[in-house]
């Protein structure tokens, strides 16, 4: 027995277990063409959110469709170790247990980190299974797996030996919460309302003062100069003079440089070389002292005098009071400025001078620019992101790849002395020892003399190898898997990591393999709420994905998300979308139950059913062409909408009505078999989007072996079709709609048969007359040359249709009703025409408003013509 309702929860578990048991997701190299996707690895400690739902549904649609099309589909799942985020969670957990990270050795801390990862890691992958994701779980990777880490270390050593990686003392972005550096791309600039503080600096040996404007008064402890534009006439008398920094009373030179904007603030700039990248440049140019006033957590150090140990923002509040009390504060103004924040911790970053490891990007980036912007070997969808990609790569800076963390791949640099250059780079400590012996000409060195750099590598330096490393391509480039699956086909990700990840994977692919890592990049939009706000737990506007699946079923959620997910455009998420997806599933389920509920008999096939089958076969082929085009352009929402219309409108609303047997009568076997065939074709098209529902119906249709499961069925093939059939039936649909409208308006029951007479001015085909007669319950359909009296009329284009009224309606009452309707329409037309005759209105209104009014005029004229024709016919019928 087929259940009356589709039970999503029960069905989802049943079929996912079945798919897993039969290893349909598993892939290994064979004779078929591969189709490969590598998952953008979510954070190992993460949980499923709406962005993951959208991104992974799209990937699953692509991989399931490829599987149906006969490709060897391989979707590699995995997780990212997420250095900053994971280490922060482990540190917080230890703190709650009364343990300070600084009291642990690296090995002790890493044990805690691995315990945390093993406990919470992989949760998100289990959640993806509930969504229906058909990943090859046997290939699951983690960026800290031994083979993955080995790939990262080899990559570092290789790039160092090529001269691309170097150690430098640079101004970096410092995250005081995570206590690590960040690359430029990990800093988010936010507009914030702040203050501009005007401070007085006394001129040495004088009672005069200079006024300096600053947004960060707490940094005065690091001031080592005052800078003025040499063209600023106001201050030329100060050349060769010195100024005294308030509170710390440090005497600093007054220097001149055209870097200073004479229009900003007071025209005088305080120079703090240790805490601003531009000030550092001025400091180097003028040989200024560099004074770092901050500890690693952004509290002030001993240079902060009596503020030592206090947080920078606390000092900012307190120092203003002191400056005001000692007469150094002139005024305070509101000031809107951009503040750099950490992408991970949200902390305000500090510019800080530090010894770090960098990757030189100038040469590495060239093949990546060429591949996307010139040869188009790699295509971004939508293509508007080409400009974003170009801007970033053409303005790229060297990548700071070191992080002051323990969770991650430890930098393979080994120090054998105290000097900055006393190090070697090698994959193992054994290799490092040999290099150190050679470099120092000291054969007595042992591993005890070597000290490995304590920094870890940036997480992105790991994940930029992802498409290669998951197949072992860095360590064994000639292995079978790598040669078969690489380069991969499609990458689905968000535009927010176009720089962090996508561009860097392209750079790595060309550097290591001399070829692209993937062919197409589908950039999804962000999932926002109805008010266009980004979804977040703090706003309380982010639904719990697993709760949505419980409520609407995985298929309903997938359809709800995808119907509004055009590439690169943000989704205004509304739960009603998922409800629409669920309703669509119910429609398909009920259509299936309707077909299976018919009694089948060996009787002749009616002409209307034969015509219906021919039309639907053509319509299916036309839709297949549309779907292929949409997929080629990565318009997945459009592809789904084409299938949605085919199934809901064409199959359920028209085809099934056209072939449905009369009440309590059987259907002929030929038509029934064709209906099942068409249903199965629909299920194949729908399967990538709604895998659970479609597999359930597929398995109910007939007893299937594991080799006959829908997940591995053959996708419908494109064949030639008669497009005229579709055009002709579109006309026939309007004729049927006209009959139904007349019946509804005149209260003529569908069970009451009527006659239909046609003046065929359009010279339309008679092919669908049998369908028109069946769906309109028409006894006779006659083509005539002259209008007939005493009939209800309507038009389809220039064709005129007449329904003789005989005893079906009260003609006198109908004439009165039509006369009233004509009078109303004439009044409406006059109001529209008066508007269009008003020159002021026509000159001032937007073009679309004018077009809308003209359409109203045309519709009113057409309606009046139809009413007048009906009145004439009915009036003549009374004579």
Image (tube, helix red, strand yellow):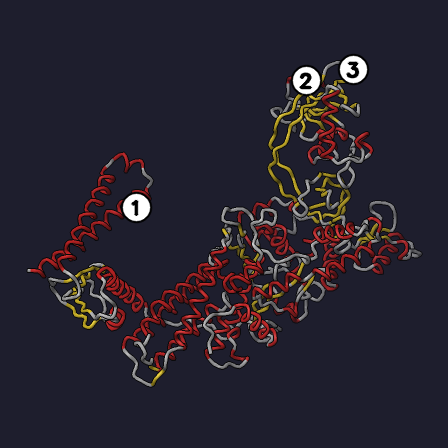
Where residue 641 sits: x, y (%)?
A: 43, 61
| Circle 2 crowding by C-alpha within 10 Å: few under 14, some 14–19, many from 20 | few
- Which label's residue is closer to the chain start, 2 or 3? 3
Where residue 332 sits: x, y (%)?
A: 65, 24
For the residues labelled 2 and 3, the Cα–Cα distance comes to: 17 Å
Where residue 751 sits: x, y (%)?
A: 24, 70
| Above or below: residue 22 compared with residue 471 | below
Instruction: Tell me which residue sits at (78%, 57%) in the image.
Output: 112
Can residue 849 be seen from the camera position used here? yes
358 or 180: nearer the eye?
180
* Quarter of the rendering containing residue 678: bottom left
Q: Residue 205, which numbered label?
A: 3
For the residues labelled 2 and 1, the Cα–Cα distance comes to: 68 Å
Task: Identify the secondary structure beneath mark 2.
Answer: helix
| Above or below: residue 722 compared with residue 330 | below
Is 153 positioned to the left or the right of 819 in the image?
Answer: right
Nearer the observer: mark 1 or 3; the answer is 1
Where residue 340 sits: x, y (%)?
A: 65, 40
Label 1 sits on residue: 852
Label 2 sits on residue: 236
Q: Residue 394, which numbered label?
A: none
| Above or below: residue 121 compared with residue 173 | below
Can residue 491 be seen from the camera position used here? no
Quarter containing the C terminus:
bottom left
Is 297 positioned to the left or the right of 692 in the image?
Answer: right
Task: Identify the secondary structure beneath mark 3.
Answer: loop
* Quarter of the rendering containing residue 763: bottom left
For the residues labelled 1 and 3, the Cα–Cα distance comes to: 79 Å
């Amino acid at each position: 027995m087929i259940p009356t309702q589709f039970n999503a929860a029960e069905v989802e578990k049943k079929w996912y277990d079945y798919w897993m048991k039969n290893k349909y997701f598993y892939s290994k190299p064979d004779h078929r063409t591969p189709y490969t996707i590598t998952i953008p690895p979510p954070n190992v400690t993460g949980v499923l959110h709406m962005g993951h739902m959208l991104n992974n549904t799209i990937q699953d649609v692509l991989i399931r469709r490829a599987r149906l099309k006969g490709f060897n589909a391989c979707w590699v799942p995995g997780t990212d170790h997420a250095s900053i985020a994971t280490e922060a969670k482990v540190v917080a957990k230890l703190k709650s247990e009364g343990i300070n990270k600084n009291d642990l050795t690296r090995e002790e801390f890493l044990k805690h980190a691995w315990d945390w990862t093993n406990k919470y890691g992989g949760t998100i992958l289990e959640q993806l299974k509930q969504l229906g994701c058909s990943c090859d779980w046997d290939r699951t990777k983690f960026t800290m797996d031994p083979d993955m880490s080995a790939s990262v270390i080899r990559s570092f050593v290789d790039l160092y030996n090529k001269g691309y990686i170097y150690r430098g003392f640079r101004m970096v972005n410092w995250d005081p919460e995570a206590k690590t550096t960040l690359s430029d791309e990990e800093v988010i600039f936010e507009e914030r309302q702040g203050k501009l503080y005007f401070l007085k600096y006394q001129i040495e040996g004088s009672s005069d003062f200079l006024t300096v404007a600053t947004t960060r008064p707490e940094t005065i402890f690091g001031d080592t100069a005052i800078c003025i534009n040499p063209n600023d006439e106001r201050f030329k008398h100060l050349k060769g003079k010195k100024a005294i920094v308030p509170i710390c009373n440090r005497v600093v030179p007054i220097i001149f440089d055209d870097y200073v904007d004479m229009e900003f603030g007071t025209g005088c700039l305080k120079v703090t070389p240790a805490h601003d990248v531009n000030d550092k440049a001025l400091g180097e140019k003028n040989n200024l002292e560099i004074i770092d006033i901050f500890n690693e957590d952004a509290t002030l150090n001993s240079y902060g005098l009596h503020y030592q140990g206090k947080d920078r923002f606390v000092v900012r509040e307190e120092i203003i009071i002191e400056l005001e009390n000692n007469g150094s504060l002139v005024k305070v103004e509101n000031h809107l400025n951009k503040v750099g924040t950490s992408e991970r911790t949200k902390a305000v970053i500090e510019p800080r001078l530090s010894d770090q490891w960098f990757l030189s990007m100038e040469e590495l980036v060239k093949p990546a620019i060429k591949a996307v912007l010139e040869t188009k070997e790699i295509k971004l969808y939508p293509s508007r992101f080409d400009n974003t990609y170009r801007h970033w790569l053409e303005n790229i800076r060297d990548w700071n790849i070191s992080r002051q963390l323990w969770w991650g791949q430890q930098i393979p640099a080994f120090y054998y002395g105290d000097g900055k250059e006393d190090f070697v780079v090698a994959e193992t400590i054994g290799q490092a020892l040999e290099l150190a012996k050679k470099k120092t000409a000291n054969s007595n060195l042992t591993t005890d003399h070597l000290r490995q750099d304590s920094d870890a590598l940036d997480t992105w330096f790991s994940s930029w190898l992802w498409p290669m490393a998951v197949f072992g391509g860095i360590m064994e480039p000639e292995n079978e898997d790598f040669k078969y699956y690489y380069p991969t086909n499609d990458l689905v990700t968000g535009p927010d990591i176009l720089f962090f990840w996508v561009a860097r994977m392209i750079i790595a692919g060309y550097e290591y393999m001399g070829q692209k890592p993937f062919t197409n990049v589908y950039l999804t939009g962000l999932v926002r709420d109805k008010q266009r706000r980004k979804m977040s737990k703090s706003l309380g506007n982010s639904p719990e994905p697993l709760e949505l699946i419980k409520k609407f079923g995985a298929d309903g959620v997938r359809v709800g998300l995808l119907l509004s997910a055009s590439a690169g455009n943000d989704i205004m998420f509304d739960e009603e979308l998922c409800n629409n997806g669920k309703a669509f599933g119910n429609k398909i389920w009920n259509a299936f139950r309707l077909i299976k509920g018919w009694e089948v008999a060996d009787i002749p096939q009616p002409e209307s059913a034969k015509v219906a089958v021919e039309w639907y076969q053509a319509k299916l082929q036309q839709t297949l062409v549309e779907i292929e085009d949409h997929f080629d352009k990565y318009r997945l929402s459009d592809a789904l909408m084409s299938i949605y219309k085919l199934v809901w409108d064409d199959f359920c609303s028209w085809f099934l009505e056209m072939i449905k047997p009369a009440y309590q009568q059987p259907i002929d076997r030929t038509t029934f078999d064709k209906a099942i065939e068409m249903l199965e074709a629909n299920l194949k098209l729908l399967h990538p989007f709604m895998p659970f529902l479609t597999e359930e119906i597929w398995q109910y249709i007939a007893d299937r072996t594991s080799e006959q499961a829908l997940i591995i069925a053959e996708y419908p093939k494109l064949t030639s079709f008669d497009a005229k059939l579709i055009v002709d039936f579109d006309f026939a649909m309007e004729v049927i709609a006209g009959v139904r409208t007349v019946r509804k308006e005149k209260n003529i029951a569908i069970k009451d048969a009527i006659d239909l007479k046609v003046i065929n001015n359009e010279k339309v085909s008679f092919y669908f007359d049998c369908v028109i007669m069946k769906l309109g319950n028409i006894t006779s359909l006659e083509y005539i040359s002259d209008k007939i009296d005493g009939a209800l009329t309507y038009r389809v284009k220039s064709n005129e249709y007449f329904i003789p009224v005989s005893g079906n309606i009260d003609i006198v009452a109908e004439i009165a009703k039509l006369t009233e309707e004509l009078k109303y329409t004439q009044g409406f037309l006059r109001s529209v025409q008066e508007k269009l005759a008003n020159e002021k209105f026509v000159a001032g209104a937007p073009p679309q408003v004018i077009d809308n009014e003209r359409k109203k005029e045309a519709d009113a004229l057409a309606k009046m013509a139809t009413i007048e024709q009906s009145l004439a016919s009915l009036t003549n019928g009374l004579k």
